[in-house]
Amino acid sequence: MKLLPLIAALFMMVVASPGPAGAQSDDPIYEKCRGEPREPWCYQEEVERLQRPELCENILRYWPDAHGVHGWCYYRLAWKKKDCSLCEPIVNEQVQRLCKREVCR
């Protein structure tokens, strides 16, 4: 019975803590792409369409293993805008090399 208050407190911390789910509900692109078979790619395509590179970071926030999609998001915008600085935040080394080779010449 001594564990019951501890378990209740832990449950409240988990339920009440703001996490990525709270941030996702404020993101209309995430809302649009949620449930799509290609969720991170849907998000990337919308970010590219809107030309908003700062939103590429949300890809890793919502889908932590989507390093390739995150990199492709920055690469496509760097290529379209001819902006070499957009290659820097790319986490995936292969995509970053491609970006620098194609955009930073």
Image (tube, grey):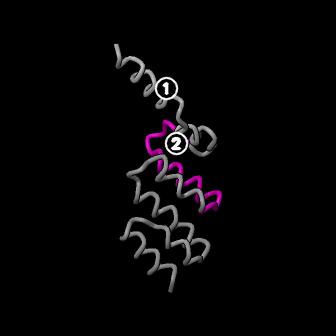
Residue 61 position (above or below residue 101): above
**Quarter holding residue 48:** bottom right
Q: Secondary structure at mark 1?
A: helix
Q: Label 2: how many residues lie within 10 Å, few (<14), some (14-19) or many (20+)? A: few
**Quarter holding residue 78:** bottom right
Describe residue 34's horizontal placement relative to residue 6 as left or right.
Answer: right
Q: Nearer the viewer, residue 70 or 6?
A: 6
Q: Are marks 2 and 1 in contact (CB under 8 Å)?
A: no
Q: Is residue 45 magenta?
A: yes
The tag earlier along the polypeptide, 2 or 1, is 1
Give the image location of residue 76, x and y in percent: 52, 66
Q: Nearer the viewer, residue 14 or 48?
A: 14
Give the image location of residue 53, x and y in percent: 59, 63
Q: Nearer the viewer, residue 53 or 42?
A: 53
Give the image location of residue 24, x and y in percent: 57, 41
Give the image location of residue 60, x and y in percent: 46, 53
**How many angstroms separate mark 2 from mark 1 (CA)?**
17 Å
The quadrant of the image that shows the N terminus is top left
The amino acid pointed to by label 1 is Met
Residue at image coords 39%, 65%? 92
Query: Magenta segment, which residues?
Result: 33-53
Q: Secondary structure at mark 2?
A: helix
The rendered magenta stretch, by its main secondary structure, is classed as helix
Q: Which residue is mark 2?
A: 20
- Numbered label attached to residue 12: 1
Choose mark 2 or mark 1, whichever is in front. 1
Residue 46 position (above or below residue 80): above
Q: Is residue 94 magenta?
A: no
